[in-house]
Image (cartoon, rainbow, N blue to C red):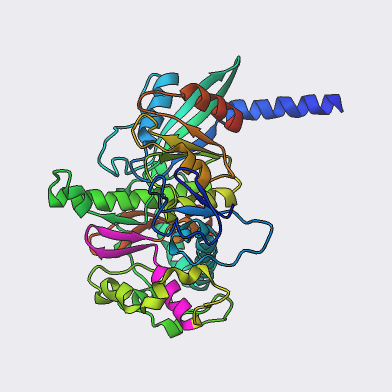
Amino acid sequence: MPHQCTSCGQVFDDGSKEMLSGCPDCGGNKFQFHASTEDVPEGPEPSAEPPDQPAPDSSVARTVGDAAATVRDLVGGSGRSQSADALDDDPSGQDTAPAGSVPSESAPAPDSPEDAAQADARSEVVSPDEIPAGTDTPPTDETPMTEDSATDPTSGSAPTDSPADASDPDTGEPSEDRPDLSELREELNDQFESIKVLSPGQYELNLMELYDREEYIIALQEDGRYTIQVPENWHD
Amino acid sequence: MGLITDIRDSISSLFSAQDPKRIGIYGPPNAGKTTLANRIARDWTGDAIGPESHIPHETRRARRKENVEIERNGKSVTIDVVDTPGVTTKVDYTEFLEHDMEKDDAVRRSREATEGVAEAMHWLREDVDGVLYVLDSTEDPFTQVNTMLVGIIESQDLPVLILANKTDLEGSNVRRIENAFPQHETLPLSALEGDNMDEVYDKIAEYFG
């Protein structure tokens, strides 16, 4: 039973056309695919795609997570020294319990001095060519994961810049339509930021990136800057 | 061997007595997380955890209720309940304007909600020992947020119970949630009405005890 309606459980044979306009019983438009013993060719109906998403989603998420980790490693040197200084200035000893932290504790952080790489990252948008692929050995002075500025004109227009093909959900078929590497980079680049400020009060969040970061974003400023709490072990 | 087993049992019971498991209540906005947290806290401690609201993102900071002692079958299980802000990939203040909110308040709520998501994700990274994943059973569970969060929880090897909430509402569809996460146990409940809470407590004791 290849296709099953996720709402009512109605089962459809592979290639069935009656499900193309939704489940005739309940009107549901999501179906899950049960792999049978024989090798079933890819169903032509777009409505069968959503249940297949988890795998591509998670692999993309992993890719993003890996890439984010790579970037974090790269920028770790400059970021850590600055963070360590910040911690030295604050003897209160922030631990890993977020409940105890309040935004006011770290409010001065955005005004603290920053090194050239961070300033550069704050003021300029990194071009896709400068972003390393997952395994490359890239230059170390780029910090594409830093925050986006609300006033940055490219932040609002970035999603529309990408070609229609790039956002097409056919990423579910990576083996056939494998996206061009530069497109993939661009897509990853779009997802790099933890929090994208589209305008004050409108945000897009990259959950994998938020989860993957060691530092913890505890306050957003109106201008798109973050206040973060850095982990205790950055002392070492 | 018997002696070693005894010692190990007593050590583990010692630890479980001293260190309650910290159970995070996760899920998308408006799934009923705070209603469930309040239900659990009121049932076993008499106190509530936080305000509930039909407006999304009412909970914008993680709230914790410590040492909630749940008694099941003559044994007691002590947990810390952490109610977390609803996790989402987009926060837009215009959504709050529909709820008779001024723009300034809506923008602030939006910013705080975004900070709340960051906090919830951070807690998931290192501060919870188990997860109650709450879903509104009248809503479609096949979403990117649900897939990603459950995937992260699985990658952490955290015990997780999927809770299909709001079974008191017309249009509740528990089967759809079971289908979405067949690898996990799904329990139907209405946190608002208190329906099926006995089974939920049984499973909490079994999973997190």
- In this rendering, the answer to whether B24 lies above or below B144 is above
Q: Can residue A92 be seen in this snapshot?
A: no
Residue A174 found in image quarter = bottom right
* Total marks placed: 0
Viewer-nearest residue: A13 or A159: A13
One can see residue A66 in this view? yes
Q: Does the magenta-highlighted stretch encompass residue B40? A: no
Residue at the farthest right position: B1
For this view, does B146 lie left or right of residue A175?
Answer: left
Q: Position of residue A158 (x, y in %)?
A: 31, 75
Residue at left 47%, top 83%? A182
Q: A3 and B153: which one is in front?
A: A3
Residue A29, how many percent across, how many down? 41, 53
Q: What is the x, y in percent for residue A188?
A: 45, 72
Q: Is residue A49 above or below residue B53?
A: below
Q: Find residue A222 and report its image quarter.
A: bottom left
Magenta span has A193?
yes
Instruction: List the single residue furthest toward the top.
Output: B74
Q: Which residues are magenta?
A: A182-205
The answer to whether residue A38 is above or below residue A163 is above
Residue at 46% over, 60% down: A17
Q: Quadrant of the C terminus of chain A?
A: bottom right
Q: Position of residue B200 (x, y in %)?
A: 50, 27
Q: B142 and B160: which one is in front? A: B142
A16 sits left or right of A197 in the view = right
